[in-house]
Image: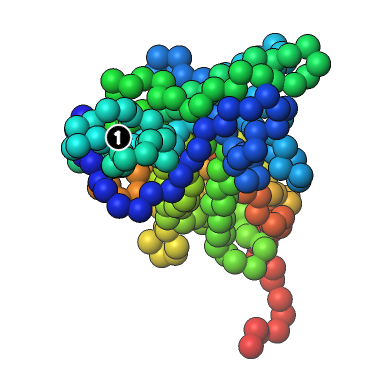
Amino acid sequence: MKYALVFGAMIALSGVAASTEADPTPPRGGGIAGEAKGSVIDVKAIDVSADGSVHRPRNADGSPASVEFRRMPASICFTQDFPTTKGQVGACGPGEREGALVVACEAEQVALDPIFKQTWVNNPDGTISDLSRWELQNPASPGDCLAAVDLAPLAEAEFQRLTITPSPVTIQPPDGWTLVNVDTITYTSPAPQTFTTTLLGIPVTIEATPDTFTWDYDDGTTPMTTTDPGRAYPHHTVAHVYEEEAVATITLATTWQGRFQITGTATWTPITGTATTTTAAPPLTIHEARARLVTEPLD
């Protein structure tokens, strides 16, 4: 991992040293905080009221937390061109020159701002005191490089939450009826579906691709599973023969495989696990064609 300095205009994120229940500079609309435990961040939500007051994060047991973690830009302060301190942007003193600390990552990686920590004391009356400034959690490693493999567990969870459009069902003959002892043709679309989302604030694209298709023809026979989506007549490859007159509802269960890609990179990473959708076609009437003798010729 490499670091670079960038000089120029910077946005100040001033630390607060006050004995008050509300943080005077909360993130608008709330945010996400997390407690870093090694390579794992225990994420907590920050609830910001309409009046701007902050309900600080709580521990897993519901008790008030006394530490908060946030990712935000870091800077280095210079005196006579020598670095003196690292801290959040806007933390340099009089006469010091400020430079942004930028993490230079390898190809196919994305840079994350460093984690800053703020602590305070929860008083019995519900107020807080000894609110510290935001300080780098790990001054020796300001910022991180994140690869797709680091996002894989989050991508897996997101894949299960996606609303995948169920595969369409096409039946031939197309008019809601078919005949006993002839092929009833079924097929669907094999097209993948793409979704855009963010994981840890990083934009990603998730792709869902149909993998297997299970056809239930609703006549008591064993459902048929295939990797073939089928084709239309006369090149059809998936069909079923009904043996009795009835009304049947054909259903299709599609199993989807997933993969994801960090925006701006070229590599796709497989997602562990699958998703399933189910489609039910309109009722299908099954007729039996019978031969009849007639006295008059048919026109």
Q: Is residue 270 above or below residue 217?
A: above
Q: Is residue 60 above or below residue 160?
A: above
Seen from the viewer's position, the closer of residues 196 and 62 is 62
Residue that extends furthest to the bottom in the rendered view of this protein: 299
Q: Is residue 168 above or below residue 138?
A: below
Q: Helix, strand or loop at disc 1?
A: strand
Residue 62: name its quadrant: top right
Instruction: Describe residue 208's horizontal placement relative to residue 59 as left or right.
Output: left
Q: Position of residue 4 (x, y in %)?
A: 21, 39
Seen from the viewer's position, the closer of residues 137 and 245 is 137
* Residue at (58% x, 27% y) in the render: 17
Q: How many marks?
A: 1
* Residue at (23% x, 31% y) in the render: 83
Amino acid type assigned to the residue bearing label 1 in the image: Ile
Q: Position of residue 243 (x, y in %)?
A: 62, 46
* Residue at (71% x, 42% y) in the render: 52
Residue 58: name its quadrant: top right
* Residue at (41% x, 21% y) in the render: 137
Q: Position of residue 260 (x, y in %)?
A: 38, 41
The reply to whether residue 273 is visible in this rendering is: no
Q: Residues within 10 Å of mark 1 (few under 14, many from 20)?
A: many
Q: Is residue 27 above or below residue 134?
A: below
The reply to whether residue 76 is visible in this rendering is: yes
Q: Position of residue 192 (x, y in %)?
A: 42, 52
Instruction: Describe residue 56's horizontal placement relative to residue 77 as left or right.
Output: right
Q: Quadrant of the N terminus?
A: top left
Residue that carries the numbered disc 1 in the rendered image: 76
Seen from the viewer's position, the closer of residues 266 and 59 is 59
Instruction: Describe residue 159's horizontal placement relative to residue 258 as left or right.
Output: right
